[in-house]
Image: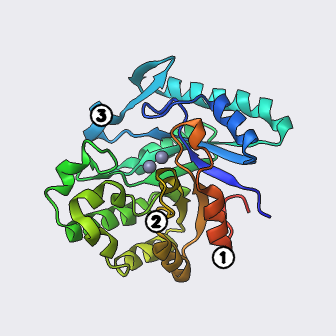
Amino acid sequence: MTELADFHIHPNYSVDATGTIRQYCDRALEIDIKHICFTTHYDLNPKRLDKDAFWRINGQKVPVTDELVSCYFEEIERVREYFSPFGLHIFRGLEFDYYDGVDREVERVRNLFPIDFVIGSVHCLDDIAISEKNEAPTYFNRKSVEQMADDYIALLIKASQVSGFDCLAHLDYYVRYGREYYGDAIDHIELERFDEAFAAFIKHNKGIEINSSPFRYGLRTFHPKPEIIERAIKAGVNIVSVGSDSHKPSQLGGGVSEAYKFLEGLGVTPSFLK
Ligand SMILES: [Zn+2]
Ligand SMILES: [Zn+2]
């Protein structure tokens, strides 16, 4: 059987996460996940610096600086050496929110640090975080479900053009907080709408992540939902990785084996570790 990998993990450098890098590694050994990648949020959208551009170190919320990012990668390096004899493979990553101009920052950061894996995500529409419970209503209240889908897919297409992204995360993340505003209509966004995005992904050699975070809310689905994953695969889109999007160690690996089983049923293995 394929060894499981969880490639979407937020340790306590992210202000919305708890659990040290070491605690995540201990947990990985406990639940027999052999490959993990830390993907701390790195969000420097110039229009949202006051909201997003912070990490936590020693319990303090502080602005992200290169020095801090350097500490993060050094800590991963130390822990990586410690856990290597136990058969745990630790990868170094970041999750970037998409905004116009992010490609230059991705390139700058990739040149500065030893990074294995960069996730590109669309969290914000009109520079409002639809991934945040408190902010999402500001956006959803002013847009129809069709306008939202148009905005979202347009940004996915732009994100696919960022050469430093190794994969695009949680394609239908708008479902999480959007359901409350759009009701069941959110389940009926036409799948055809994604086809243009898939064509762009292929053109720009960009694959997607299967994000298993819904499992920790008791939902047996993924981001994106299975119908979108199947449509993407049929269109020729590469499946790069599986990730739990953990924000604490107890969430590590949640839904990951289910995602692997689902992909196995489709004859697909995530490509990043192939
Ligand atoms: Zn994300
Ligand atoms: Zn994440």
State if disc 3 and disc 2 touch (CB < 8 Å): no
- Observer-nearest residue: 148 or 93? 148
Q: Quadrant of residue 210?
A: bottom right
Callout 3 crowding tier (Cα within 10 Å): few <14, some 14–19, many ≥20: few
Label 2: which residue? 224
Q: Position of residue 133 (x, y in %)?
A: 30, 45
Mark 2 CB lies closer than 8 A to ligand 1: no
- Observer-nearest residue: 248 or 168? 248
Q: Give the Cα distance between marks 1 and 3.
A: 41 Å
Which one is in front in this view, the residue at disc 2 or the one at disc 1?
A: 1
For the C terminus, the image quarter is: bottom right
**Residue shown at the point (51%, 63%) measured from the top left:** 220
Label 3: which residue? 51
For the N terminus, the image quarter is: bottom right
**Residue shown at the point (68%, 77%) measured from the top left:** 267
Q: Give the Cα distance between marks 2 and 3.
A: 26 Å
Q: Give the Cα distance between marks 2 and 1.
A: 17 Å
Which amino acid is tagged 1?
Gly
Q: Is mark 2 on a helix, strand or loop?
A: loop
**Residue shown at the point (37%, 32%) measured from the top left:** 53
Q: Which of marks 2 and 3 is nearer the N terminus?
A: 3
Label 1: which residue? 265
Which one is in front in this view, the residue at disc 2 or the one at disc 3?
A: 2
Above or below for 62 versus 252: above
Q: Position of residue 151 (x, y in %)?
A: 26, 64
